[in-house]
Every structure is written in structure tokens, then in C-alpha cells.
Image (cartoon, grey):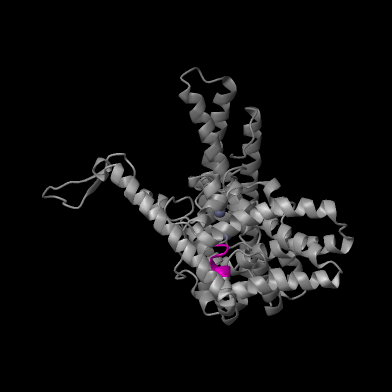
Amino acid sequence: MIAKKVIGLPLKGLRFAMKSGDTLIQHAGTQALRVKTWLDTSKSKTDHPADKFATINNDKDANAVVNYEGIDPLELEFQKSPINLVPAIFLIATPIAAAVITPWYLLTHQVSAPVWGVFGAFMVWTGISITAGYHRLLSHRAYKAHPLVKNFLLLGSTLAVQGSAFDWVSGHRTHHRHVDDRMEDPYSAQRGFFFSHIGWMLRNYPSGRFDYKNIPDLTKDKVLQIQHKYYGLWVLATNVAMVAAVGWLVGDVWGTLVLAGLLRLVLTHHFTFFINSLCHMFGTRPYTDTNSARDNFFLAIFTWGEGYHNYHHFFQYDYRNGVKWWQYDPTKWLIVGLSKLGLTSELRTVDDTTIKHAEVQMQFKKAQQQIDNATASGHDIPHAMRSFQDRIKFEYDAFTQTVEEWQALKAKTIELKKTEFADRLHEVDEKLRQDYAKIEQKILAHNSNLKTAFRSIGQSPKAA
Ligand SMILES: [Zn+2]
Ligand SMILES: [Zn+2]
């Protein structure tokens, strides 16, 4: 997910605030591009373009282009995307500035406890505003929020400098829709760690151009329109004016700017970026292996619960990412806590049976892989593996039957709700509830039988 042009929009505000400076930057950017284009052209001249591409002049397809190096022309265009100058400078300069200025400041100045307190509070506010605000509220509509909560999270998300809500949400919805697609997913993990972490924002890649067609619910929102239009000003107001004002209140403007401003900004940037990079690389895949998203407890610590990314990609409308009660997901705790105060409502969840069904399905898939690996070796299958294979086959037949019963029950539920009279609905509901509970118990039993089977071959059913 995340920041389309972390600065793409700040830039618009900067343009508003410092027009001449911005024109200079833009001019420099245009010049740099011209030089780059000229260099590319000169290079391709010396490389003899005819060596790379040849147009086939035959009757069938006069325009077909063949690339003799075997590179897809679209990929080549992708690789030649122009540099996003201001975001690139910002994203490279701020970590360097933080790495140099913070240690120097801490070594040469005494920082008071209240300043550290502001740093901590701003870390929480910024990070959780992205996860609870931009992500679960605006991107996925996983719950409804009181305007007070929504605007507080919106302010925190602006403080995060990850683009306007329009850009962020549009990019994130595209990420879910085209996850892992090298051409369509804006931060496709298939292009490696660097690209999915930060590289995608450094150039103006075709996959990073959003047209807002996928955010009709947001473009109507007046508050979000204002945030988008004056985004740069909002960024300056929150990251400089507000941080400095709080610094003045605690008696140390510069200390607060360095820690709660610069250091907090860089840390929250990269913690969020981890979700696009590391959360698509390291961890387990308990719910689906049809995409690269992983569940990772350690990453959940840095990302306010978003580390359970495999679950999230499978059940994206659930307000929880760490769905188990014990999983570390402070964002879910905040949303549920606020619901007790009446400040959030309509929290969307996926029912437990559906979640367990997905998990058990994945465990069967992993079991099948184990069996395939053992049989592919060509040697005699060990006795333990052979009995594992029998157990899995037996269990899978039973599981298929349970799933059929479950589907039939769902169809019956729809039919009953349509035909039963209102005064009998209560009775019907109670019976259905009991039937669903039975199905859930059966799926739990399949899950525990699978665990036992995996233990017999010294394995865990968790899919990496
Ligand atoms: Zn993802
Ligand atoms: Zn998402």
C-alpha cells in the first residue's frame, strides 16, 4: 500500500506556498530529464537500435515488434520511466538527514522527557492514523467512524506525508486488485525488495499513475477534497508549524522538530513501507498462497498490527488484520475500543467458520505438497509418509463432505429467510445457529486431525 509520491502531493502544496522555488525545482527536473533523454538517445544511436528491435515487414503484421534481447517492450518502457524528482529527493534526503542530525543533536543537546513523550505520541498518532485511517477506514471501509475520529486520523495521516487520501487509497485498492502483477500492482513485490519498499515512488512508473476511478466514494467527500487540493500546505502545517508549536509548549522547539518531526517522519515512513516489501516476503501463508502476502508477528510490532498481511489480502474487508484474539494488532484494539464509546460502528468481520475453512484448505494444500515432494524423489516412500498420505486422503474426503453440508446449510438459510413468516424467524434462527455451530465444530476437528497428521511426519501445518 502506501504513499503514491510521498511528495507528489506535498509538491502541489509547496507549489502553492513557494511558487518560485517550485518552478526552479521543476525546471531542474525538466532539464535533468532532457539530459537523460539525450543520453538515452545517444546511447541507443551508438547501440544501433536495429540490433535491438526489428520491425517485421510481412503481410500478416507489419507493425509487430520483435525484441531480439527477449525483453518485453512494455517492460522496457517501464524501466525507462522518468525520475519523480521531488519525491526522490525527499525520500533519499530525509533518512540521510535523520541519520546525521539525530545522533549529532542527541550528543550535543539535553533532550527533556516531555520532548521524548511528544516523539512517542507522534509516532503512535502517525502510524495508527495510517493503519486505522487511510487503510482500514478509507481504503477498505472496514468500519464507520464518527467525524471526530475520522478527522483526527486524517490529520495524523497527513502528518505521515504519504500522499493525499485520494492517492494513497487509489494506489492501495489497485495493489489489492492486481497484487503481484509486475505491470499493474504499484508496489509489486515481484520486482524485489527495493522496488516494493521505496523504489516505486522514485520514478513515475506506469503502474503508479492513478486515475481515481476506483475511489468514487472518496472523491465526493468534501473534507478529503480539501485535503487533496491543499495537501502541501497541510503537510507543512502539521509537520513544521504544529510540531514547532508543540515544541514551544514543551520548551524545546528544535529538539521537538528533530525528534517528533524529522526522526518520527522517517521511522513511520519505513515502518509503513515494510508492509509492501517485507510483509510480501517473510512469514507464513496460513490462509492463501495465491499471492505473496505473509503473516509476520515481528512486522506486526512495527506496523501496528498490519503484519498479518496474508489474512488481510484474503479477507480485506475485515477490520482486524490479526484476527486471532491473541495476535498483536493495536489498530484492531483501537477500533473496537472506540466502538465501545460509540465513536466507531458497523465493524465488519469474516465469520469464524469461513476463516477456519480457509486455514484448513491451506493445510491440505501443504499436505499435498509434502506428499508430492516425497513421491517425486523416486525412492520408496518412508512408512510414516505413507500412513500420512492415507490419513490425509481420509481426512480430505471427510472435509469435502463437511464443506458440502455447509454449502447446503447456507442455501437453506437463504431459502428460509425468504419464505418463513416473521413470527417463526426466531425459531428458525435458533435452529440454524445450532447447525452452523455443528459445522464449525466439524471444521475444528478436521483442523486438529491435520495437526496430528503433520506431527507424525515431524512437520508443522503452517505454510511458508
Ligand atoms: Zn499487500
Ligand atoms: Zn489493504
* Membership of 8 in magenta stretch: yes
The kind of secondary structure the magenta stretch mainly shows is helix
Magenta stretch, residue numbers: 5-12
Note whether 219 is above or below 124 in the view shown. Answer: below
* Membership of 252 in magenta stretch: no
Note whether 279 is above or below 269 in the view shown. Answer: above
Drawn side of residue 162 relative to residue 112, left or right: left
Drawn side of residue 381 relative to residue 448, left or right: left
Residue at image coords 40%, 58% = 34
* Quadrant containing ligand 2: bottom right
Drawn side of residue 258 relative to residue 405, left or right: right
Q: Picture coordinates of residue 329 (x, y %)?
A: 71, 56
Quarter residue 262 falls in: bottom right
Q: Picture coordinates of residue 446 (x, y %)?
A: 61, 43
Is any atom of residue 272 visible in this view? Answer: no
Q: Picture coordinates of residue 81 (x, y %)?
A: 42, 55
- Figure quadrant of the N terminus: bottom right
Residue at image coords 52%, 20% = 381
Note whether 139 is above or below 355 in the view shown. Answer: below
- Figure quadrant of the C terminus: top right
129 and 419: which one is in front? 129
Residue at image coords 58%, 44% = 285
